[in-house]
Image: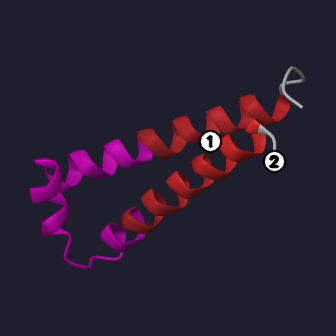
């Protein structure tokens, strides 16, 4: 596997994990353990999750459209 594919798989796993946690919080299930784990309020964690997911999507787009890596 090329380094491009490895990086894209890692970013995919990151997006899937954060989207799963965000889905749980949006669905209204108890997410108090997340707040205690990251020392953030639920709103701050949701905003942080959106930031991470958006950033990872931009990185995947940049890597997938670059011609320098095989």
Label 1 element class: helix
Q: Which residue is mark 1?
A: 57
28 or 68: nearer the viewer: 68
Magenta span: predominant SS is: helix
Q: Which mark is residue 1?
A: 2
Q: Is residue 60 left or right of residue 21?
A: right
Which quarter of the image is occupied by the C terminus? top right
What is the span of residues highlighted in magenta in the rendered image? Answer: 22-50
Name the element at disc 2.
loop
The residue at 27%/76% (across/down) is 28
| Residue 58 screen position, x and y as percent | 63, 34
Q: Is residue 47 magenta?
A: yes
Q: Counting residues from the N terminus, which is met first, the one under dot 2 or under dot 1?
A: 2
> Where residue 5 sits in the image (x, y, percent)?
76, 45
Disc number lying in front (2 or 1): 2
Q: Position of residue 47 (x, y in %)?
A: 33, 44
Q: Quadrant of residue 27?
A: bottom left
Above or below, comparing residue 17 to residue 9 in the picture: below
């Amino acid at each position: 596997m090329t380094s491009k594919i490895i990086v894209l798989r890692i970013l995919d796993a990151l997006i899937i994990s954060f989207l799963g946690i965000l889905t749980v919080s949006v669905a209204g299930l108890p997410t108090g353990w997340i707040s205690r784990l990251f020392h953030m309020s639920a709103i701050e964690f949701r905003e942080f999750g959106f930031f991470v997911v958006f950033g990872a999507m931009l990185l995947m787009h940049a890597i997938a459209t670059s011609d320098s890596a095989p």
